[in-house]
């Protein structure tokens, strides 16, 4: 792992460059550490080129204040909060109690939690997400299958929806697609963009010209949706 210290706007950051088994490169911000992950199978020329590009973009985003640490991306729920996911509206009711109990009646999600439990937020988050997925997961699967059958005809092995803080979606070499749960809380055209993006990876692994040409053929307005996701995505809670 390569480590670099850098001053950005008067604040000290570290840049960690790591190699991974993933097929795509990415950069993420954890507190004051920029982690640049590069596929180990790439040529050294591609590693150096993409690392420098991600480094410059990360520094620029921090300077502009448009990139928040992953610690600020945690999805938490509040008492009385109303959530709309793929046309389904849910209401959250949270009440302190001596023991942790949770139930869902229709779309009313009720959680009684131990106020002194340091894991209460994680327990609440996991329960609420699980209950919302019970009502919406089939709709996501239907959207994926529709877009796949219409434009890609790829063989998909698994479809998973997870609460992640670093990526919006991924497609494994074996055809397993994973989507960020937070996409369900966004306009459906944004969800569709990420689905199309990941399905395009069944044809082209890297983000080259042929990949983006395919995305554009399926979704001509993909740049507008991509910009919306970049600007607003992590603010959706």
Image: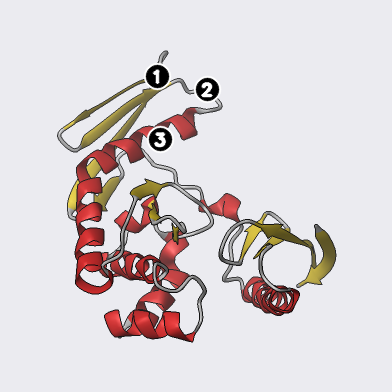
Mark pair 2, 3: CA separation = 15 Å
Query: Which residue position holds label 3?
Result: 126
**Mark with earlier residue (2, 3):** 2
Tally of numbered discs: 3
* In the rendered image, the vertical position of residue 6 relative to residue 106, given as above or below: below
Counting other residues with Cα less than 10 Å from the Cα at mark 2, is it few (<14), some (14-19), or many (20 or more)?
A: few
Residue sticking out furthest to the top: 98
Q: Position of residue 29 (x, y in %)?
A: 64, 59
Q: Secondary structure at mark 2?
A: loop
Q: Secondary structure at mark 3?
A: helix
Q: State the residue in front, 52 or 214.
A: 214
Mark pair 2, 1: CA separation = 9 Å
Q: Position of residue 3 (x, y in %)?
A: 83, 61
**Mark with earlier residue (1, 3):** 1
Closest to the camera, between mark 1 and mark 3, is 3
Q: Are marks 2 and 1 in contact (CB under 8 Å)?
A: yes
At x 24%, y 53%, the residue is 141
Query: Which residue position holds label 2?
Result: 117
**What mark, if any, has residue 100 been given in the picture?**
1
| Residue 35 sits in quarter | bottom right
């Amino acid at each position: 792992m390569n480590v670099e210290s850098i001053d950005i706007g008067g604040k000290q950051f570290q840049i960690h460059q790591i190699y991974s088994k993933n097929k795509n490169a990415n950069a993420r911000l954890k507190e004051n550490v920029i982690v640049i992950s590069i596929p180990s199978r790439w040529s050294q020329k591609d590693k150096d080129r993409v690392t420098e590009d991600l480094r410059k973009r990360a520094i620029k985003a921090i300077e502009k204040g448009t990139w928040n640490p992953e610690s600020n991306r945690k999805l938490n729920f509040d008492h009385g909060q109303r959530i709309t996911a793929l046309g389904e509206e849910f209401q959250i009711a949270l009440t302190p109690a001596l023991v942790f109990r949770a139930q869902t009646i229709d779309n009313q999600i009720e959680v009684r939690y131990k106020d002194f439990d340091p894991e209460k937020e994680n327990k609440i988050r996991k329960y609420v997400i699980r209950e919302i997925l019970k009502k919406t997961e089939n709709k996501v699967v239907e959207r994926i299958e529709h877009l796949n059958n219409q434009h890609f005809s790829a063989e998909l092995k698994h479809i998973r929806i997870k609460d992640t803080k670093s990526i919006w979606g991924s497609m494994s070499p074996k055809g397993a697609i994973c989507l960020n749960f937070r996409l369900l809380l966004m306009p459906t055209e944004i969800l569709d963009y990420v689905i199309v993006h990941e399905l395009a990876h069944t044809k082209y692994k890297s983000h080259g010209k042929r990949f983006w040409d395919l995305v554009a053929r399926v979704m001509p307005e993909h740049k507008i949706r991509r910009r919306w996701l970049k600007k607003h995505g992590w603010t959706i809670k």
